[in-house]
């Protein structure tokens, strides 16, 4: 099994390289391209409420802001989200494609504003905008930074955390940036802890 996981990791790294190198591209062009790609992927999920999510994203700086402790450049949040999506596509072909798309692209979306813990704000905004998450999607996003072992039983959760760490670690390596969490990531969890399964 080791060669299999090594191959997956190498594939994931190769998939994130274009994102790391895209700093040479004009930031506004990249942001526009990423916006179109993200809308295309979200729309393809066909999930009820997804059009409202797409519209609401356009009222925020989701496509132009940085991601925090990594992908700090203009458009970094959307770039990181797409890298996570590409990695999950490769490593999680056996999972529901709509769940992969929504959790990959929206897991850090709560960074568009402040107050409380960003994974909580991600699920909160999606709910307010009318997208009903499955239980697995909800816990995958909510706990993507928290070592709650009980939620590692969800393959989607494992896949997202792996892709998230790989994308951010590769960005830090590429930019020779120290491995420090963004202030937003270090705060205590805000909002209700959904221990109701
Ligand atoms: Fe996050």
Image (cartoon, helix red, strand yellow):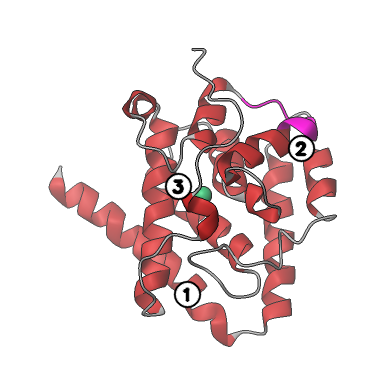
35 up-or-down from 109: above or below: below
Q: x, y percentage for residue 168?
A: 42, 62
Identified at 58% across, 50% down, the residue is 108
Q: Main secondary structure of the magenta part?
A: loop
C-alpha separation, residue under disc 3 versus residue under disc 1: 17 Å
Residue ID for mark 3 = 88
Mark 1 surroundings: few (<14), some (14-19) or many (≥20) residues within 10 A: many
Mark 2 surroundings: few (<14), some (14-19) or many (≥20) residues within 10 A: many
Viewer-closest of 173 and 102: 173
Nearer the camera: disc 3 or disc 1: 1
Q: x, y percentage for residue 3?
A: 16, 51
Which element carries disc 2, helix, strand or loop? helix
Q: Which badge, 3 or 1, comes first in the chain's sequence?
A: 1
Residue 130 on the magenta segment? yes
**Magenta span:** 127-133
Q: x, y percentage for residue 86?
A: 49, 55
Task: Please tell me in which quadrant of the rendered image residue 48 appears.
Answer: top right
Which element carries disc 3, helix, strand or loop? helix
Viewer-closest of 49 and 145: 145
- Badges 2 and 1: C-beta atoms under 8 Å apart? no
Residue 100 on the magenta segment? no
Task: Please tell me in which quadrant of the rendered image residue 173 appears.
Answer: bottom left
Identified at 29% across, 56% down, the residue is 9
Disc 2: residue Cβ within 8 A of ligand 1's nearest atom: no
Image position of 114 (left or right of 160): right
Residue ID for mark 2 = 50
Residue ID for mark 1 = 20
Question: Which quarter shows the N terminus?
Answer: top left
Q: x, y percentage for residue 6?
A: 21, 55
- Badges 2 and 3: C-beta atoms under 8 Å apart? no
């Amino acid at each position: 099994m080791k060669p299999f996981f090594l191959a997956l990791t190498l594939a994931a790294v190769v998939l994130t390289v274009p994102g790391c190198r895209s700093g040479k591209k004009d930031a506004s062009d990249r942001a526009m391209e990423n916006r179109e790609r993200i809308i295309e992927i979200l729309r393809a999920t066909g999930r009820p409420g997804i059009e409202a999510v797409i519209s609401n994203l356009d009222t925020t700086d989701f496509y132009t802001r940085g991601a925090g402790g990594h992908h700090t450049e203009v458009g970094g949040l959307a770039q990181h989200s797409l890298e996570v999506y590409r990695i999950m596509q490769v490593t999680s072909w056996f999972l529901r494609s709509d769940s992969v798309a929504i959790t990959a692209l929206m897991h850090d979306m709560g960074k568009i504003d402040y107050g409380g813990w960003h994974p909580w704000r991600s699920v909160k905004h999606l709910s307010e905008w009318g997208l009903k998450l499955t239980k697995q999607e909800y816990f995958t996003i909510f706990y993507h930074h928290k070592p709650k072992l009980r939620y590692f039983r969800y393959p989607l959760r494992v896949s997202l955390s792996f892709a998230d760490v790989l994308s951010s670690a590769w960005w830090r390596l590429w930019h020779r940036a120290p491995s420090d969490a963004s202030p937003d990531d270090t705060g205590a969890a805000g909002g209700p802890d959904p221990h109701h399964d």
